[in-house]
Image (cartoon, rainbow, N blue to C red):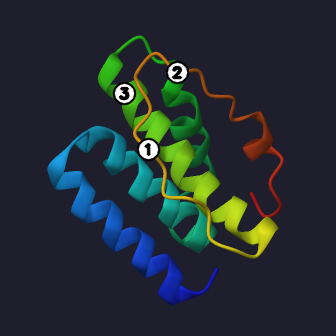
Amino acid sequence: MTKDEFEEILSRAEATYAENAPLYWCGFRRGLRRAFLGHAASSQIDHFAWLDFYRDADACVAELGRGYIDGLEAVVAHGRSGRRKAWPEVRPASSATDPGSLLDSAGE
């Protein structure tokens, strides 16, 4: 993923943030930055805490966690396929997420 592609996805997330699901998109932007910038964006402790947020009993924290994981996956999927992933849809709060594959990502 190039810097221009990263900035394009980030700007789309910021535009969507104001329209709907602000907690999800806040997490998405943070995950996007972490995946693109790595350790410069956050510490390992913060990263693993955010990966666990999706399981939180508080719906707001869980929504942040789902967004964070999707932001990470947007960059990871782009790197694997060499092409842009479809723009993510906001997932309902009841959807399950398995961040296990993200724990094994190179450089994390």
Residue 46: tell me if it is visible. Answer: no
Q: Nearer the viewer, residue 39 or 106?
A: 106
- Of marks 1 and 2, the one in the foreground: 1
- Of marks 3 and 1, the one in the foreground: 1
**Disc 3: which residue:** 61
Can you say which quadrant of the picture contains the N terminus? bottom right
Q: Name the residue rendered at 53%, 87% in the picture.
A: 3
Q: Amino acid at mark 2?
A: Ser
Residue 59 falls in image quadrant? top left
Q: Nearer the viewer, residue 16 or 105?
A: 16
User: Disc count in the image?
Assistant: 3
Going by the image, does 25 lie left or right of 106? left
The CA span between labels 1 and 2 is 12 Å
Q: Name the residue rendered at 62%, 28% in the picture.
A: 97
Q: Is residue 33 above or below residue 82?
A: above
Residue 22 image position (x, y, % from top left): 23, 43
The CA span between labels 2 and 3 is 14 Å
Q: Name the residue rendered at 48%, 35% in the picture.
A: 66
Q: Nearer the viewer, residue 49 or 9?
A: 9
**Disc 2: which residue:** 95
Element marked by disc 3: helix
Q: Amino acid at mark 1?
A: Glu
Q: Name the residue rendered at 57%, 47% in the picture.
A: 47
**Disc 1: which residue:** 89
Q: Is residue 53 above or below residue 39?
A: above
Q: Amino acid at mark 3?
A: Val
Can you say which quadrant of the picture contains the C terminus? bottom right
Residue 20 image position (x, y, % from top left): 21, 43
